[in-house]
Image: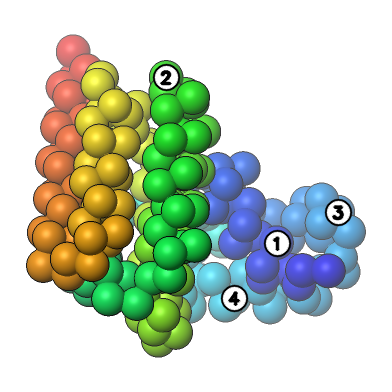
Amino acid sequence: MKDAYSLILSAIDNGSYRPGDRLVESELAERFGVSRTPVREALQRLETQSMLKRDGRSLIVATLDHNQLAELYTVRAELEALAARLAARHATPEEVRVLAGMVEDDRAILGDPQALARANRRFHHQIHLASHNRYLVQQLDLVHRSMALMARTSLAAQGRDVVTLDEHQAIVDAIAAHDGAAAEQALRHHISMAFETRLKEEARLADEEED
């Protein structure tokens, strides 16, 4: 059974708790069927990791500001590109087929941003694993944990879902061809487009709030 820390982290990652939501120790203990002591320790740990922040006496799920978002995407692009380059070198034929199958299967859920967001995480994690570098996988897990602090998925933007899968296919094709440079370039382009889309969506939503 998962511990309190893993349970709360998973709930943030899957969107059960969104940025700005208040986390109450007693409610979490009841929800997950654990005592309050491990919940308290888990909340302290998540606060230390900047997944939670103080709002008066309460703890809420943290929100990334513009600078944090830019910093996160910078680090993500570098690490993801390295993972793609290593995957092109080390991925087994079975791993390549799994990646190709993911892209094909995900076309069936076009139009469902939340389902695609979950599928997108699985796809990227599979690339991380295909790099066959445990230290890189650990660092990318930390990066993707912080991605859960984004209130919305960029896949909800008009037309982004179809383009994303085309970008995924280009990454898989490069990995399958054992072309590390092409895999790295395709992954960097993919992250750059996702970041650009997110910035445009944030700007659009800010304009709507002012109207």
- Tag 3's secondary structure? helix
The residue tagged 3 is: 30
Coordinates of residue 71 in the picture (x, y in percent): 18, 64
Which of label 3 and label 1 is nearer to you? Answer: 1
Looking at the image, how many numbered discs can be counted on the residues?
Answer: 4
Q: Quadrant of the C terminus?
A: top left
In primary-sequence order, the first of circles 2 and 3 is 3
Q: CA distance from mark 3 to mark 4?
A: 18 Å
Residue 144 can be seen, yes or no: no
- Tag 1's secondary structure? helix
The residue tagged 4 is: 44
The residue tagged 1 is: 7
**Amino acid type for the residue under numbered disc 1:** Leu
Residue at 25% across, 35% down: 166
**Amino acid type for the residue under numbered disc 3:** Glu
In primary-sequence order, the first of circles 4 and 2 is 4
- Tag 4's secondary structure? helix
Quick one: which residue is furthest to the top in this view?
Answer: 211
Residue at 42% across, 23% down: 110
Coordinates of residue 184 in the picture (x, y in percent): 16, 64
Which of label 2 and label 1 is nearer to you? Answer: 2
Residue at 86% across, 54% down: 30
The residue tagged 2 is: 111
Residue at 66% across, 67% down: 6
Coordinates of residue 114 in the picture (x, y in percent): 49, 32
**Amino acid type for the residue under numbered disc 4:** Gln
